[in-house]
Image (spheres, helix red, strand yellow):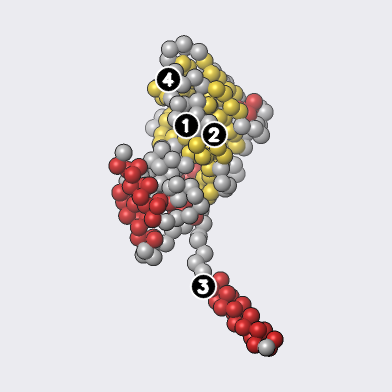
């Protein structure tokens, strides 16, 4: 009897080995990597994160209330190693600025609201040149229309800020041309970056199409094509990398299934 049990256990272990060996390994997306499960942020709060900056960094961000004209300003050097949180009254809409010194250099966006920015935010590691033709491979920017200068976008020279909902990310590209930022896990919400260049005429402000939750086909927007691709994946007719797997878990329950298709379709039709 013991011999039969031993044989059965060996058979089960062997079968398990076959399953493990044949299991599909989800490949990395070398352009954008999901680093952790994220943080929960509240509505009506400005949350400032930094990456690869030092106490000598001069960059910052500020918001001006439309009704009160009250300024909410943050310098990135004060946010090193911590998430700085500021309460933003829901009765206000804001004009957003970025600068080289925490002041108000250049109007980058008007009508900003923090009323519905609460929810889950996930940290991504982003190879800048892979997600935007604006950047060189080392994360720098070369002015092709003006003086031809190359800006490193590091430390206290030029500034680079990414915006996603209530998360503001003051960053400098590392030696690999990468940054780490938080984006909101909300289908269709676009991520933008702004940069202030000392010898350039004004603020540069752009969306980054790949950095959009629910953008499963990685083509820049969340639409019916993403829902169709998700259905194909569930039917075994498509393969996803880790970024696509992250984008496809629409309801953030740790599973990718037909419920995500339904939730995505509902989001698209709203």
State the residue lying farthest toward the front.
1
Q: Position of residue 23 (x, y in %)?
A: 51, 69
How many residues crowd mark 3 within 10 Å: few (<14), some (14–19), many (20+)?
A: few
The residue beneath circle 3 is 22
The residue beneath circle 2 is 41
Give whichever of discs 4 and 1 has the lower sequence position: 4
How many residues crowd mark 4 within 10 Å: few (<14), some (14–19), many (20+)?
A: many
Q: CA distance from mark 3 to mark 1?
A: 42 Å
Numbered marks: total: 4
| Foreground of the two, 38 or 80 | 38
The residue beneath circle 1 is 117
- Please say if the residues under marks 4 and 2 sit with CB atoms less than 8 Å apart: no
Q: CA distance from mark 2 to mark 1?
A: 8 Å
- Please say if the residues under marks 2 and 1 sit with CB atoms less than 8 Å apart: yes
Give whichever of discs 3 and 1 has the lower sequence position: 3
How many residues crowd mark 2 within 10 Å: few (<14), some (14–19), many (20+)?
A: some
Give whichever of discs 2 and 1 has the lower sequence position: 2
Compared to residue 97, the image places residue 137 above or below, namely: below
- Please say if the residues under marks 3 and 2 sit with CB atoms less than 8 Å apart: no
Q: Position of residue 137 (x, y in %)?
A: 50, 46
The residue beneath circle 4 is 93
Give whichever of discs 3 and 2 has the lower sequence position: 3
Q: CA distance from mark 4 to mark 2?
A: 19 Å
Tag 4 secondary structure: loop
Q: Position of residue 187 (x, y in %)?
A: 40, 42
Q: Residue at x 67, y 84 (%)?
A: 6
User: Of circles 4 and 2, which is in front?
Assistant: 2
User: Of circles 3 and 1, which is in front?
Assistant: 1
User: Of circles 3 and 2, which is in front?
Assistant: 2
């Amino acid at each position: 009897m013991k011999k039969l049990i031993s044989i059965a256990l060996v058979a089960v272990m062997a079968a398990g080995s076959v399953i493990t060996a044949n299991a599909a390994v989800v490949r990395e997306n070398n352009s954008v990597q999901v680093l952790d499960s994220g943080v929960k942020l509240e509505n009506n709060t400005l949350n400032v994160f930094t990456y690869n900056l030092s106490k000598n960094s001069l960059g910052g961000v500020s918001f001006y209330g439309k009704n009160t004209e009250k300024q909410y300003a943050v310098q990135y050097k004060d946010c090193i190693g911590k998430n700085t949180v500021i309460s933003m009254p829901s009765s206000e809409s804001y004009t957003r600025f970025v600068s080289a010194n925490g002041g108000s250099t250049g109007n980058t966006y008007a009508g900003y609201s923090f009323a519905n920015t609460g929810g889950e935010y996930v940290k991504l590691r982003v190879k800048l040149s892979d997600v935007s033709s604006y950047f060189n491979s080392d994360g720098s920017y070369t002015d092709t229309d003006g003086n031809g200068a190359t800006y490193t976008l590091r430390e206290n020279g030029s500034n680079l800020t990414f915006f996603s909902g209530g998360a503001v990310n003051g960053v400098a590209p590392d030696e690999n041309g990468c940054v780490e930022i938080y984006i909101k896990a909300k289908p269709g919400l676009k991520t933008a970056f702004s940069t202030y260049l000392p010898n350039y005429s004004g603020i540069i402000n752009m969306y980054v199409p790949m950095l959009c939750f629910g953008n499963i086909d990685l083509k820049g927007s969340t639409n019916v094509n993403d829902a169709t691709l998700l259905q194909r994946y569930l039917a075994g007719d498509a393969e996803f990398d880790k970024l696509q797997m992250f984008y496809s878990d629409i309801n953030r329950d740790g599973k990718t299934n037909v419920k995500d298709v339904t939730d995505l379709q509902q989001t698209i039709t709203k």
